Image (tube, grey):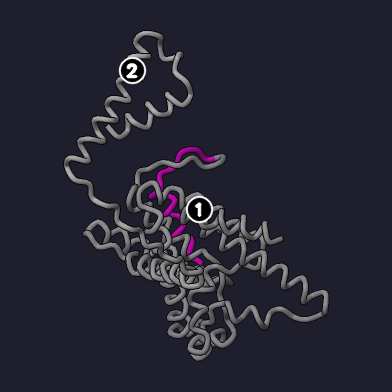
């Protein structure tokens, strides 16, 4: 079990940012399902503790659980919800890293998820339609973060074509437009919170590419925070490593010019004797000791 853990840890560390996001989402999904299964066997409800990871629309609850603004975007309960989001993350994440870089991918994912979550909370506390639901509505899933990635790359390369099953080649801009309009017209549906968060993610993806075109990378704060945690982990690892003992080397005695010239002449004479032997009898006539001596002396010449 320990070997499996270390192998997975090594693979995670060596993987790129897209795979890391996929690994984290998958690990959280599997852990949730295992815990749910275990609790069900003991006839215990799992809905209570999951709400500590979901994003509430109730601001009073959010103040007590601020971490949910981050955890909700890695959380999935239903298999097909998880599968669809991960497939979209993989497809559009690959395209994103073609036009941007890996560090920017993580920044857009997290900022897109936060933007989607904030718009969802704001909408549920402003529009009268959601007044009756705000006290007991929670949201989860990576959809808003994925939408941010999709819109960012669609704005960067609007005419880039992707091949869709049973449809053929479609430009990215049309895919983004269809996805955004679908979410917009679905904000009064049963999944209103999710659709609103998609709009928030899309808005950040649009804003991100516009800012980047003007020379400002909005993903840098996320990158800086992640680098800080990474360096902190390395520092703590180094702290617990046993300290190495330092050996003090004694300085070699400096030779005079006469001693140096005398030694150099001796080396040259010994090499000349070996070279004469090679000239008359060939390199194969040398003994193993003479070959080694020739090699050693040649380095000092």
Residue 227 is left or right of residue 67, and the answer is left
Q: Quadrant of the C terminus?
A: top left
Quadrant in the rendering for residue 180: bottom left
Among the two numbered marks 1 and 2 on one chain, the one whose residue lies closer to the N terminus: 1
* Viewer-nearest residue: 8 or 249: 249
Residue at x-position 51% and y-position 60%: 21
Judging depth in this view, the residue of 300 and 239 nearest the camera is: 300
What is the CA distance from the residue labelled 1 to the residue labelled 2?
Answer: 52 Å
Residue 133 spot, x, y in % from top left: 56, 84
Q: Magenta segment, which residues?
A: 167-186
In the image, is residue 78 above or below residue 49? above
Q: Is residue 182 above or below residue 52?
A: above
Q: Position of residue 51 (x, y in %)?
A: 61, 80
Secondary structure mostly seen in magenta is helix
Looking at the picture, how far across and down is residue 90, in whole percent? 51, 52
Q: Horizontal and vertical percent for residue 68?
A: 52, 78
Q: Which mark is residue 14?
A: 1
Q: Which mark is residue 275?
A: 2
Tags 1 and 2 in contact by the CB under 8 Å rule? no
């Amino acid at each position: 079990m320990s070997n499996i853990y270390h192998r997975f840890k090594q693979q995670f560390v060596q993987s790129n940012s897209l795979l890391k996001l996929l690994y984290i989402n998958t690990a959280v999904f599997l852990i949730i399902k295992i815990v749910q299964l275990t609790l069900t066997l003991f006839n215990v409800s799992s809905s209570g503790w999951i709400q500590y990871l979901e994003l509430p629309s109730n601001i009073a609850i959010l103040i007590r659980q601020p971490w949910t603004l981050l955890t909700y975007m890695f959380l999935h309960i239903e298999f097909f919800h998880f599968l669809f989001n991960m497939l979209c993350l993989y497809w559009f994440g690959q395209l994103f890293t073609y036009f941007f870089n890996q560090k920017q991918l993580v920044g857009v994912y997290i900022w897109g998820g936060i933007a989607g979550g904030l718009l969802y909370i704001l909408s549920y506390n402003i529009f009268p339609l959601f007044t009756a639901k705000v006290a007991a509505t929670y949201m989860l899933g990576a959809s808003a973060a994925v939408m941010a990635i999709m819109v960012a790359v669609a704005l960067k390369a609007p005419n880039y074509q992707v091949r869709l099953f049973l449809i053929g080649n479609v430009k990215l801009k049309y895919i983004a437009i269809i996805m955004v309009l679908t979410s917009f017209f679905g904000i009064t549906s049963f999944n209103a919170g999710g659709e609103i968060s998609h709009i928030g993610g899309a808005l950040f993806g649009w804003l991100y590419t516009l800012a980047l075109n003007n020379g400002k990378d909005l993903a840098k704060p996320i990158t800086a925070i992640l680098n800080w945690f990474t360096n902190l982990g390395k520092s703590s690892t180094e702290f617990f490593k046993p300290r190495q003992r330092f050996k003090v080397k004694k300085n070699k005695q400096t030779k005079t010019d006469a001693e140096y010239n005398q030694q150099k002449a001796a080396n040259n004479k010994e090499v000349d004797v070996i070279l004469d032997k090679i000239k008359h009898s060939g390199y194969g006539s040398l003994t193993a000791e003479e070959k080694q001596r020739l090699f050693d002396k040649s380095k000092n010449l």
